Structure formats: structure tokens, C-alpha cells
């Protein structure tokens, strides 16, 4: 039995290009909305192994992806650390901000694994319920991206509160990142212990940081997580996603030691091929192409498949599906990828 996606992440590509999509479970699927309605709060939904397992499997049944990504959220980690996290309809996530010594002193690792343990149970059930050849992906947010929510107390456009804390109180911000390195490493190791074949670290908001901040807040914490996971699970691929890191993408790959990297929509195929000489790449169809569908979507998909056919490539989006996505377009996309040969 081989898992094509797992093998490709280990730099052993086959003649078919494996695929999965960020946000492949989500609001564009009617069966997701139906299951989601069974839980009042989004965090409870993430902590319900029955429901989380079901929505993880839904896109696999429909489209036969090579990878299933655990259904949870990056904000499970701050919740496990004792910060209050909730989702307001139409507003996205809300958290009680951690932005000074007093609020920082209220969070920590005590009780972390008990609080998030339901996620590990979801992983165990998934490995049991998934077809053997499907790769199971665990994930977490990277410390910087998770910190932007923890400090701001919500999503934000420019992550001003986190940048400000990082520049004005580097000691405190450093301790917050250190806590996140520890929690995130343990969280991912526990997912691997429970059956995850590979893990992805989402640094969704790593865009446009000055280089010293990128080094300290993105590269260094990610490098530390990679080395902690490696110490326990040498063979498990770790995928990094420094979204919109632009000119710092290659430095990120070189210095963090990730096994593979996800390319955002803005990375050219020429740069993608350069990076492919270092590690396997994932990406990078614009999710709005799948809203549009039709010949434009198919042509763009083939351009990416052909452009990255010289090395290890996992087909994916450059960012997650949006709720406006038409499920029929996803079927057409899956067919295009499955019939392509390198
Ligand atoms: O109404 C709903 O059902 C909520 C929508 C939703 C979903 C489907 C949220 C709230 N989270 C999720 C699941 C999720 N989130 C997954 C697993 C499922 C899959 O991919 O198929 C994963 C991997 C995430 C990761 C995640 N959450 C990221 C990183 C990836 C990315 O999209 O950049 C981020 C930034 C979040 C925070 C978050 N959670 C939810 C929302 C709406 C947001 C974004 C808020 C913002 O824009 O700031």
C-alpha cells in the first residue's frame, strides 16, 4: 500500500500528481452546512470527534482527494492555553486579548492536552475510517499567525496590535512566542502519535514583515517546532506555509528545515521551480478560479501542473476555498488533476 501524497512529500513523486485543497471541508459544501448546524458553537464543533470526523470525510467521498486534512481550527491552541475563544457569526473569531503581563500570566500549558484532547480523538478515528491510500494531514497555526489573533483579540487587516507588542515589548512578545512553540510542538506531536501522516504549519499572516521581524517571529519559532517534531518523529513530513512571504520564501525554506512548502497564489512558477530544487512544493491555484470555473480554471490548472511537472508537486490552492465555490467546479478541477500525467 502506498500513499501517493505522503510519498510525494518525501520527494518520491509518481506519474500522477496528488492533490488536496485548503478548506476542502467548509461552507461551500451543503453536507458541511448540514453537519455544522448540529453544533451551536464553532469551537464545540471542533471538539466533537463525531462531527469533525464526518466533515473531514465529506470532501474525500465526493472528490477522492489524496489527502484528508483534520477538521479543527488554528485557534484551538489559544483555547487550550486557557484564553477565551469564540466565533461570532459575520465577525469571525473573538478572543480576550493577551497583550500585557497581567493577561499573559493567565495563560499556560496547564491542562492543555485535556482541553484539546478531543482533536486527538478525531485524528484516531480518521486514521481508522479513511481509505488506506489516503494521507491524513494534521495541522496547526504557526506561532506568529496565532499570536496575531491572541494579541488583537480578533482577526485584523495589518496585525498592528501584534507588531506593536513585538516592537514595544519584545521580551513579553518573545515569551508568548516561546509558549506557542511549546504548545504547537506538543499539539502536532500528539496528532502524529494519534495517526497523522504529515502536518502543515499555517503562517497565513507572514506577509510584509520586515526581515528582522520575519527572522524572529516566523523563521525562528517554525525552526524550533520543526526540530522538536523531528526529535520524536524523524520520518514525518512537515509542510510550511509562509503565505505571502514573497522574497523571503526561499530563506524560510532554507532556514526552517521544513520538508515541503505550500506556495501562495502570488508565487511564480519560475520561483516555484527554484524552490522545488530544495523541497517538494504544494500549490497554487487561485481559489477564485474555482468560483469562476470553466475553461479558464482548467487552463490555469494545466499551466500549474505542467509548470511544476519537473519535480515533486502536490496540487493545491494558493489559499483556501471561499464559501461562494460551486461544488460542481471542484468536481471538474479534481477530474483535470486526476487525469494529468507527468
Ligand atoms: O462557519 C464556519 O463553519 C467557519 C468557517 C471555518 C472553517 C471551515 C473556520 C473559522 N475554520 C474552519 C476550519 C479550518 N480552519 C481548517 C480545517 C478544514 C479544512 O481546511 O478543510 C483549517 C486548516 C483552518 C485553518 C485556519 N483557521 C487558518 C489558516 C489557514 C487560512 O485559511 O489562512 C486561519 C487563519 C484560521 C482562522 C479562522 N477560522 C475561521 C475563520 C473564518 C478564520 C479566519 C478569520 C480571519 O480572516 O481572520
Image (tube, rainbow, N blue to C red):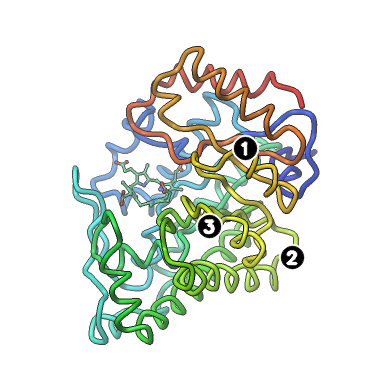
Q: Of 207 and 30, which appears nearest the observer?
A: 207
* Residue marked by disc 2: 234
* Residue 235: % across, % down: 75, 60
Q: Residue at x 67, y 31 (%)?
A: 307
Mark 1 and mark 3 lie on one chain; the one further toward the N terminus is 3
Residue 87 in the image: above or below residue 213:
above
* Image location (x, y in percent) of residue 94: 22, 58
Structural distance between the alpha carbons of marks 1 and 2: 30 Å
Q: Nearer the viewer, mark 1 or mark 3?
A: 1
- Between disc 1 and disc 2, the foreground one is 1
| Residue for badge 1 | 269
In the rendered image, which quarter contains the C terminus?
top right
Q: Residue at x 64, y 67 (%)?
A: 255
Determine the image quadrant of residue 160. Answer: bottom left
Label 2 crowd (10 A; few <14 / some 14-19 / many >=20): few
> Which is more N-terminal, label 2 or label 3?
3
Identify the element where label 1 is drawn.
Answer: helix
Circle 3 is placed at which residue position? 201
Badge 3 marks a residue whose secondary structure is strand
Secondary element at tag 2: loop
Amino acid at each position: 500500500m502506498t500513499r501517493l501524497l505522503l510519498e510525494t512529500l518525501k520527494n518520491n513523486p509518481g506519474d500522477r500528481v496528488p492533490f488536496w485543497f485548503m478548506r476542502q471541508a467548509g461552507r461551500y459544501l451543503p453536507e458541511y452546512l448540514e453537519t455544522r448546524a448540529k453544533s451551536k458553537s464553532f469551537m464545540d464543533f471542533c471538539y466533537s470527534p463525531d462531527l469533525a470526523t464526518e466533515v473531514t470525510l465529506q470532501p474525500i467521498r465526493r472528490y477522492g482527494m489524496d489527502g484528508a486534512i483534520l477538521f479543527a481550527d488554528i485557534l484551538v491552541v489559544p483555547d487550550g492555553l486557557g484564553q477565551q475563544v469564540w466565533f461570532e457569526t459575520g465577525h469571525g473569531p473573538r478572543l480576550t486579548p493577551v497583550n500585557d503581563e497581567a493577561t499573559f500570566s493567565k495563560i499556560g500549558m496547564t491542562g492543555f492536552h485535556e482541553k484539546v484532547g478531543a482533536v486527538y480523538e478525531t485524528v484516531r478515528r480518521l486514521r481508522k475510517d479513511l481509505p488506506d491510500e489516503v494521507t491524513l494531514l494534521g495541522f496547526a497555526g504557526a506561532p506568529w499567525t496565532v499570536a496575531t489573533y491572541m494579541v488583537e483579540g480578533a482577526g485584523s487587516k495589518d496585525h498592528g496590535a501584534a507588531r506593536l507588542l513585538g516592537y514595544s515589548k519584545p521580551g513579553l512578545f518573545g515569551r508568548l512566542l516561546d509558549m506557542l512553540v511549546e504548545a504547537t510542538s506538543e499539539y502536532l506531536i500528539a496528532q502524529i502519535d494519534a495517526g497523522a501522516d504529515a502536518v502543515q504549519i499555517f503562517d497565513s499572516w507572514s506577509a510584509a514583515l520586515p526581515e528582522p521581524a520575519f527572522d524572529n517571529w516566523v523563521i525562528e519559532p517554525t525552526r524550533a517546532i520543526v526540530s522538536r517534531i523531528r526529535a520524536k518523529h524523524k520520518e514525518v513530513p512537515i509542510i510550511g506555509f509562509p503565505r505571502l512571504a514573497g522574497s523571503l520564501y526561499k530563506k524560510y525554506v532554507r532556514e526552517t528545515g521544513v520538508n515541503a512548502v505550500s506556495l501562495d497564489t502570488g508565487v511564480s512558477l519560475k520561483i516555484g521551480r527554484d524552490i522545488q530544487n530544495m523541497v517538494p512544493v504544494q500549490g497554487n491555484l487561485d481559489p477564485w478560479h474555482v468560483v469562476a470555473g470553466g475553461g479558464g480554471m482548467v487552463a490555469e490548472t494545466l499551466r500549474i501542473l505542467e509548470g511544476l511537472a519537473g519535480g515533486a508537486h502536490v496540487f493545491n490552492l494558493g489559499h483556501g476555498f471561499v464559501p461562494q465555490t460551486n461544488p460542481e467546479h471542484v468536481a471538474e478541477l479534481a477530474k483535470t488533476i486526476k487525469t494529468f500525467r507527468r
